[in-house]
């Protein structure tokens, strides 16, 4: 099986994010001047350009804002998994932040473990974490346990 491409865990702008996911925590940057949170991280506040930001915990709960389904051809590491969904999650506690990720049936389930026919805009999801290398633990999303996702 081909390896999937992974992010760099030592990038100065994203290193803290990957440190947090290894601890099963989802974090976003927050501006020390205006208080606005942001993701993906930047070396400064995208709203007011203040250079100092801090990382704050996010609850890891959200709703599906949009989604797509990959049918291929894809990168070699994903070819055996098509079709698989890619979702955009709007965070409950930072609703202007939307994270792209995978919807999975369980923390260690494959990225094609939830049938695309069961996905809907507005579906509540909770974050799950899966270690894919020594450095990188990916946040993935699971349908909230109370949700019925039968097609
Ligand atoms: Zn700011």
Image: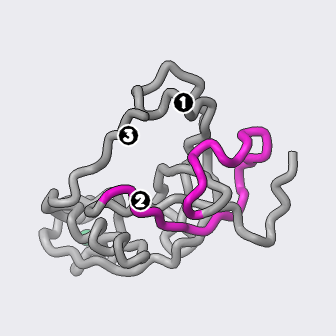
The magenta segment: 107-133
Which of the two discs, 3 and 1, labels the residue nearer the N terminus?
3
| Quadrant of the drawing holding the C terminus | top right
Measured along the vertical axis of the image, is residue 96 above or below residue 57?
Answer: above
Q: Secondary structure at mark 1?
A: helix
- Magenta region includes residue 110: yes
With 21 as the anchor, is 141 left or right in this view? Answer: right
C-alpha gap between disc 2 and disc 1: 20 Å
Nearer the camera: disc 2 or disc 1: 1
Q: Position of residue 67 (x, y in %)?
A: 61, 42
Tell whether label 1 touches label 2 (CB within 8 Å). Answer: no
Which residue is found at the position 37% from the left and 78% from the top?
23
Disc ID at residue 138: 2
Q: Secondary structure at mark 3?
A: loop
Nearer the camera: disc 3 or disc 2: 3
Label 1: how many Cα within 10 Å (few below 14, some 14–19, many 20+): some
Label 2: how many Cα within 10 Å (few below 14, some 14–19, many 20+): many
Q: Quadrant of ligand 1?
A: bottom left
Measured along the vertical axis of the image, is residue 9 above or below residue 4?
Answer: below
Residue reaching furthest front?
A: 1
C-alpha gap between disc 3 and disc 1: 11 Å
Q: Position of residue 84 (x, y in %)?
A: 60, 37
Find disc 3 in the rendering and name its residue.
4
- Magenta region includes residue 59: no
Which residue is found at the position 26% from the left and 62% from the top?
135
Q: Position of residue 35 (x, y in %)?
A: 32, 78
Measured along the vertical axis of the image, is residue 140 above or below residue 33?
Answer: above
Disc ID at residue 80: 1
Q: Quadrant of residue 56?
A: bottom left
């Amino acid at each position: 099986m081909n390896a999937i491409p992974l992010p760099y865990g030592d990038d100065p702008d994203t290193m803290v994010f990957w440190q947090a996911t290894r601890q099963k925590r989802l974090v976003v940057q927050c501006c020390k001047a205006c208080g606005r949170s942001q993701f993906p991280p930047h070396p400064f506040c995208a709203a007011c350009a203040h250079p100092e930001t801090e990382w704050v915990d996010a609850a890891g709960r959200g709703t599906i804002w949009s989604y797509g389904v990959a049918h291929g051809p894809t990168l070699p590491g994903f070819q055996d998994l098509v079709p698989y969904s890619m979702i955009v999650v709007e965070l409950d506690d930072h609703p202007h932040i939307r994270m792209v990720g995978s919807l999975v049936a369980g923390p260690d389930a494959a990225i094609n473990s939830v049938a695309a026919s069961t996905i809907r805009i507005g579906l509540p999801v909770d974050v799950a974490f899966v270690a894919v290398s020594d450095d990188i633990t990916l946040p993935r999303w699971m349908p909230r346990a109370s949700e019925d996702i039968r097609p």
